[in-house]
Image: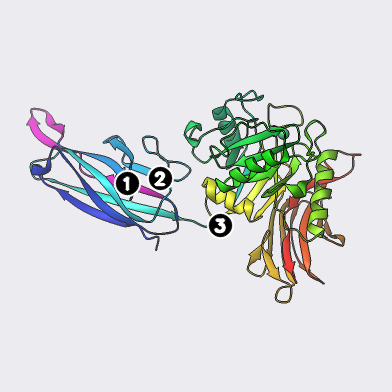
Amino acid sequence: MSQPITISLFIRKEQEGTYFTQPFHLPEGMESFTLTYRYPRSTGEKTGLPGGLFTNRQNVNTIDLGLIAPDGTQVGASGSDKNEITISAAWATPGYQPHEPVPGEWQILVGAYKVAPDGVNVEYEITFVPEKVRLLKGDLHTHTLASDGVHTVEELGWKAQRHGLDFVAITDHNQMVTSDALPRIHGVTFIPGIEWTHYMCHANFLGCAKPYDAPFATNSLEGTLERFQSARERGALVVINHPFEEVAKLSYDINSLPFDCLEVWNGPMRESNLKALKLWHSMLSAGKKVPITGGSDYHRDTPFIFLGGPTTCVYARSQSVKGILDALRQGHAYITFAPSGPSLGLTAGDAMLGDSVRWTEVKEMQVAVNGLLAGDVVKVVTASGGDVLLQAPADGSFEAAYTMLQPGFARVEVYRAFLPGLPMLPALISNPVYFDP
Ligand SMILES: [Zn+2]
Ligand SMILES: [Zn+2]
């Protein structure tokens, strides 16, 4: 289904100076596609001269390129400047707009600017990258010059790329940002967001340019609920941020708010994060299914704060904003202290972390951790406590099976001694697999 499409198009001299379209069918389930085309641009006329041969090169063919989406919108046009363009929801070759690779009939816009007397044959090829689950790393909580950060969005994007991050959410205090205002950096998906910043609660609304119409401020729980509900109705992922952060703690009862994820790891690991982990664990133990996120709350570099500290790692079907947010919503994610932190695979039958299985059908969970350092401790945590699976004897990788003796949840934590003499701290926290009764 993802075989390349090739189209051979013959353009006659009489078509010179006109535009027309050449359709092609984009199959379903693609993350991106690349269109290339080639044709003989010039012919050489050889002239015998005393002492040699002179070739007179002339551009006799100039065929322009553009692209039209199934709904008729112009995705872009590049004249004869580019012979290869790539389109995805997150990124497109400059001159083209990022566009969801929707299945259906797309049109190559052909501009026959110059055509040789005998006509010209143009070869088009369209190749696809299908959607496929892969691990992506990113930071879900950052501030820029638009609030109290010191970098522009673009600077954050380049920083993210240098740190090995695949996505970064822009979450300025009470500042909405539209996708159009976000730069395009190949390999980095910008997630538009806002940190709804209020005396009673901080919450990230991710993936929506305008989560609510009213001003951010309200003095009632009802007003807060209105903004949260509006954000969710408009497709935003709602994350309750740093519930125990001293100057910005959650003052509402968490159970009174509609939300999708809980930020249990905000910036460097410290007391407030350990409290958030405890709150989350108690919610899981009470039978709730709450996906977690992490974010650096990056404003500027300090000795303990850096972009991607912590990093949220998601198993996403695509690198589009939707692909990443869907994965977060499903709990297909774990958090590491940095982009270079350990990585985790957690499955149970066909399910992965964040998913639910029936305990009567699946009891065993497969744990695979890479990037461990000597001394790291790998734990499986359930409602009844933590089981140490491994104290790493050396740097390396680890695989094990863990059997659930009763229904419940099981998640993984990796602990590391970051500084000699100080207690071990989490290096990785995962969402659970839920074993339903
Ligand atoms: Zn905050
Ligand atoms: Zn913040």
Prevailing secondary structure class for the magenta stretch in the rendered image: strand
Quadrant of the frame with the N terminus: bottom left
Residue 226 in which image quadrant: top right
Q: Position of residue 399 (x, y in %)?
A: 73, 62
Q: Position of residue 40 (x, y in %)?
A: 20, 42
Q: Quadrant of ligand 1?
A: top right
On screen, residue 45 above or below 399 = above
Ligand 2 closer than 8 Å to label 1 CB: no
Q: Amino acid at mark 2?
A: Ile
| 115 and 210: which is toward the camera | 210
Residue at (74, 67) in percent of width and height: 435
Lower position in the chain sequence, tag 1 or tag 2: 1
In the image, is 430 to the left or to the right of 160?
Answer: right
Q: Which residue is mark 3?
A: 133
Quadrant of the frame with the C terminus: bottom right
Q: CA distance from mark 2 to mark 3?
A: 19 Å
Q: Amino acid at mark 1?
A: Thr
Q: Which residues are magenta?
A: 33-59
Q: Which residue is mark 1?
A: 36
Residue at (40, 54) in percent of width and height: 128
Q: Residues within 10 Å of mark 3 (few under 14, many from 20)?
A: some
- Residue that lies at the very extreme toward the bottom in this rendered image: 360
Q: Amino acid at mark 3?
A: Val
Q: Which residue is mark 2?
A: 87
Lower position in the chain sequence, tag 2 or tag 3: 2
Label 2 element class = strand
Q: Nearer the viewer, mark 1 or mark 2?
A: 2
Q: CA distance from mark 1 to mark 3?
A: 26 Å
Q: CA distance from mark 1 to mark 2?
A: 12 Å
In the image, is 316 to the left or to the right of 400?
Answer: left
